[in-house]
Every structure is written in C-alpha cells, then in structure tokens.
Amino acid sequence: MKKIVSIYFLLFCVFSYAQNEYPQVLSFDVKIKEGNNIGKSNAINETYHFLMLNSYEAIDLRAYGNKECEFKIIGHHLNKIILTYNQPSKLIKKGMCAAGIEKGILYLELDDHNTILKSQLHLLESCLLSIEVIKEKKLNETTTEYLFENQQTSASYYLIVDHNNATVTKNMFKTD
C-alpha cells in the first residue's frame, strides 16, 4: 500500500509539473501512529497544497481551497491541526471582488490511521460573502478570539481559537 501511495504521489507530481501546476509540499517529521502527536517541531509553519503527515501519507489541502490557496499551521495537539488559509476571492481577476481575499481557519481532526474524522472551515473575511473581522483579541498567550460579522445577514459570531490545545469554538454574538 505504501508503494502504491508513493507511486500515485510521484505520478501526480509529474502530471502537475507537465501542466505547470507543480504542487508545493510541506514536509515535516510527524509520527501520528506513535502517540498521535502531530509535529513537535516549531519549524512547522507554512504549507500550500499538501500537508505531509509522514514520509508516505499526505492530506491534499486543495480540497479546502482553490489552487492559489496558501495554508499556515497555527496549532496542533495530538490528532488535531488548525491552519489559517488565504486565497483570492476569484481566480479570474475581473468583476466584483477581482482583487478580493478570502481568509479563514481550517480545523482538521484525524484518527489513528490518519483518516480525517472532522474538518471545519470558518470564514473570517470574505469579499464574496461580505464577511469581515470586527475585532481580534488575544485572550492569553495561546488563545485568540475573533468577532466577525456577515454584513449580508447582519449576523455576528465569536470564533475562539486555542492554538495550544488545537480547539476552535464558534458562538453566536449576543447583544445585551
């Protein structure tokens, strides 16, 4: 099975290179099967298309964004990973939001076999959907709270991101 995955990945890279879309890969030492600790190195910081879990397993992040999407790992704990993402609102630079940006948080939870159990995308800023962060506040050294608003629906939400424990909590904003 390892050889099949490696061959598939190699063929994919060759095909992508031929199409001038060579994927960028973040590779880091991760031993998920040994205690489910994702990356103990602080060198894990940026990835673009693939999140390499070990030398033969990867998560294709293109399923969560367009081909211009860039990801950055901001937290991991046991089998949970939090990434920020940033991508253009549109790949064709014409019309409304041609220069717009879509930003958010991607939360991934894996099982012992590196299968994705849970994935959540949380938009923080979106030109297309008129979503923007109103306030960003550090609650402590490892936790950030975002207050963002959907201007189309006038709904406001809190998103609390704990980088140390790799948790993301979304709550409706309540006015007193």
Image: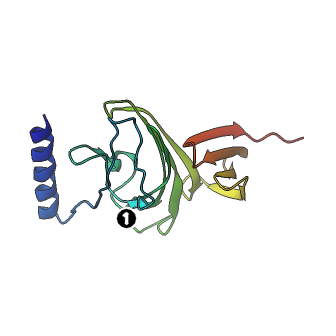
State the quadrant of the C terminus.
top right
Q: In the rendered image, is residue 107 in sight? A: yes
| Image quarter of residue 175 | top right
Near-viewer residue (83 or 67) = 83
Q: In the rendered image, is residue 153 in sight? A: no
Where does the image place residue 166, in percent across and percent down from the top left?
54, 43
User: In percent of the image, x 43 and y 37: which residue is there?
Assistant: 79
Tell whether 107 sits left or right of 59: right
State the quadrant of the N terminus.
top left
User: In percent of the image, x 37 and y 64: which residue is there?
Assistant: 92
Near-viewer residue (102 or 113) = 113
Q: Residues within 10 Å of mark 1 (few under 14, many from 20)?
A: few
Tell whether 6 sits left or right of 114: left
User: In percent of the image, x 9 and y 41: which residue is there?
Assistant: 3
Q: Residue furthest front?
A: 34
Where does the image place residue 40, in percent across and percent down from the top left?
43, 51
Q: Residue furthest right?
A: 176
| Image quarter of residue 16 | bottom left
Amino acid of disc 1: Ile
Please tell me whether mark 1 sits on a helix, a strand or a loop: loop
Task: Report how many numbered discs are placed on residues in the image.
Answer: 1
Which residue lies under the disc numbered 1? Answer: 92
Tell whether 167 sits left or right of 118: right
User: In percent of the image, x 70 and y 45: which residue is there?
Assistant: 158
Near-viewer residue (20 or 139) = 139
Where does the image place residue 168, in percent across and percent down from the top left?
59, 41
Give the image's coloring scheme: rainbow
